[in-house]
Amino acid sequence: VQLQASGGGLVQAGGSLRLSCAASGRTFNNYVMGWFRQAPGKEREFVAAIRWRAGYTYYADSVKNRFTASRDNAKTAVYLQMNSLKPEDTAVYYCAFRPNMIVASSIPDPDVYNYWGRGTQVTVSS
């Protein structure tokens, strides 16, 4: 499985960006796609995730009601719409793929994801 993330950039606080992540190669109906981010000097942290089959979404408290994860079945792609961006959202954003089911409580754990895309930089200026 290969993942390609795109859509990062520089935006002012309060602005919006939309990240995309396309998966190619062998995929499975029950997979989970996650979004993580890592700011300089900080650990990688969970942002959002979506279960492919059911479309259930999960969010970190810090982005709830601002970010929205969605999927495009035909393109095997997922998106992260980021609104009301804050300077603290500045980080490298990664998409990650797990090819099978997992309990919801484990979805924020980066160790459960098998494949990772290259990150895309998101910078929010104040």
Image: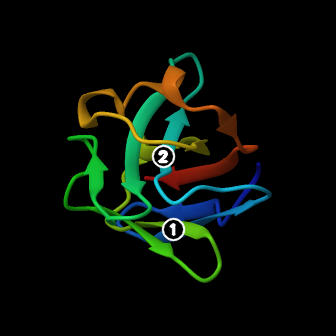
Numbered circle sitting on residue 31: none
Task: Work out whether residue 44 can be spotted.
Answer: no
Image height of 16 relative to 124, above or below: below
For image coordinates 62% across by 61% down, the residue present is: 10
Question: What secondary structure is marked by label 1?
Answer: strand
User: Image check: 106 left or right of 10?
Assistant: left
Instruction: Give whichever of 90, 103 is nearer the camera.
Output: 103
Rendering colour mode: rainbow
- The outermost residue toward the bottom is 74
The residue at the point 64 percent across, 32 percent down is 114
Instruction: Using the rendered view, name the quadrant where residue 104 is placed.
Output: top left
Q: Which mark is residue 34?
A: 2
Q: Report the number of discs.
A: 2
Cα–Cα span, label 2 and label 1: 10 Å
Question: Element type at marker 2?
Answer: strand
Q: Residues within 10 Å of mark 2 (few under 14, many from 20)?
A: many
**Label 1 near label 2: C-beta < 8 Å?**
no
Nearest to N terminus: mark 2 or mark 1: 2
The residue wearing badge 1 is: 79
**Which residue type carries mark 2?**
Gly
Q: Is residue 77 above or below residue 4?
A: below
Q: Quadrant of residue 62?
A: top left
Q: Position of residue 95 (x, y in %)?
A: 60, 47
Neighbours of disc 1 within 10 Å: few (<14), some (14-19), many (20+): many
Taking depth in this image into account, of 120 and 21 the one nearest to the observer is 21
Residue at the spot x=50%, y=53% of the render?
124
Residue sitting nearer the eye, 104 or 10: 104
Q: Position of residue 125 (x, y in %)?
A: 50, 53
Residue 9 x/y as whole percent: 65, 61
Task: Name the residue: 70% across, 44% down.
Answer: 119
